[in-house]
Amino acid sequence: MYRTIISPEELREKLGRQTWIIIDCRYRLGQPTAGYEAYLEGHIPNAQYAHLDKDLSGKIVPGKTGRHPLPSLVKATQRFSSWGIGDGVQVVLYDDRSGAIAARLWWMLRWLGHERVAVLDGGWNAWQERGYPVTQELPSTGPRVFKPRPKKGWTVDAHYIQSRLQDEDFLLVDSRSANRFSGKDEPIDPVAGHIPGAANFPHTDLIESDGYWLMPDEIEDRFEELLGDDEADEVVFYCGSGVTACRNLLAYRHAGLGDAKLYPGSWSEWITDESRPVEKKDNFKKV
């Protein structure tokens, strides 16, 4: 069973197995059709396609939700069933951003009780570099019955965060870049800055320059540096819209540190309420 990261070599050996489901999660912010177009041009054999906006997100409510709210339990269950995900099925996810998008689906499946799911190390680029099989043929995988088993306490909302901001045993981690965290640069959302008291751990710091994941012990060392001498009883990750924070959650698990929590609404939801505090100072903790 693969639960976090799987190598291209390991996936290549398992191609064609009926109890293995592969899902292509390529996506481009601002270019909503680009990922699917790339999928049609070529993908890993038998891979199906998951669209971040259509499949992995719910309806946006202006002034209330973030940019990628979680889909309803019914919608997620129907989609997972249609992809052929059920008990005993191993799921492998990939994108062309070293898991930045695929990790969202990894987290969602685990959140709803499916543990047999992993992200492809190096993603689409690593697969191509090895000259492994690529096809334009669309898969004909039949549906299965996905039985959701939602895990309690895996998500928190804005109200909960506000109630715990001053607690010493609570660690809130912003997964965006240092410039966005500090408020120096905000190319996406209308308000710059971060949630007061948050530490900064950019999700891109988990990936080597060649697009592969750091080794688990290296990831563990970086998280320990983030924690410092503090032993937080509760660690919550957020980002811009609840997507790339999932890469930090995947890394946290891959390093053997357990399961942290997700604030799904993230920054884009936080700023919908002007009464919520915002910090823009450059005196943040970064590793």
Image (cartoon, rainbow, N blue to C red):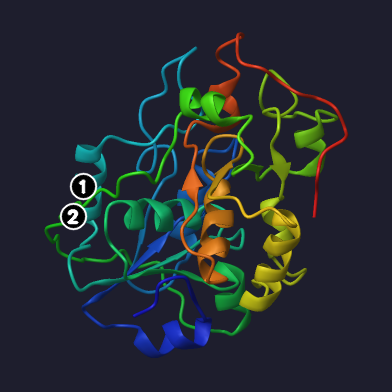
> What percent of the width, then of the height, locates residue 10?
45, 87
Q: Is residue 245 left or right of residue 191?
A: left
Is residue 211 at least partly visible in the picture?
Answer: no
Residue 24 is situated, as x and y percent measured from the top left of the image, at 43, 60
Q: Residues within 10 Å of mark 1 (few under 14, many from 20)?
A: some
Residue 3 visible, this orientation: yes
Please report the residue visible at 50 percent of the width from the left and 37 percent of the height from the top.
Answer: 263
Binning the other alpha carbons within 10 Å of mark 2 as few (below 14), some (14 to 19) or many (20 upward) gives some
- The correct choice, above or below, for 94 with respect to 238 in the image is below
Q: Which residue is tagged 2?
A: 81
Give the residue displayed 15% in from the left and 64% down from the top: 142
Give coordinates of residue 282: x percent, y percent: 88, 33
Which quadrant of the view contains residue 228? bottom right
Query: Which residue type does callout 1 highlight?
Result: Thr
Decide which of 174, 38 is in the foreground and name it. 174
Q: Which residue is mark 1?
A: 77
Distance from Cα at disc 1 to Cα at disc 2:
6 Å
Give residue 204's quadrant in the image.
bottom right
Apparent side of residue 72 relative to residue 33 in the rendered image (left or right): left
Q: Are marks 1 and 2 in contact (CB under 8 Å)?
A: yes
Local secondary structure at mark 1: helix
Per the image, label 2 sits on a secondary structure element best described as helix
> Which residue is rendered at x = 57% and y = 23% of the image?
270
Q: Quadrant of the N terminus?
A: bottom left
Relative to 157, residue 147 above or below: below
Looking at the image, is 71 positioned above or below residue 89? Answer: above
Question: Looking at numbered disc 2 in the image, what kind of residue is underneath it?
Answer: Ser
- The image's mark for residue 242 is none
Give 144 or 65, whichever is nearer the viewer.
Answer: 65
Horizontal side of residue 78 vs 233, given as left or right: left
User: How many marks are shown on the rendered structure?
Assistant: 2
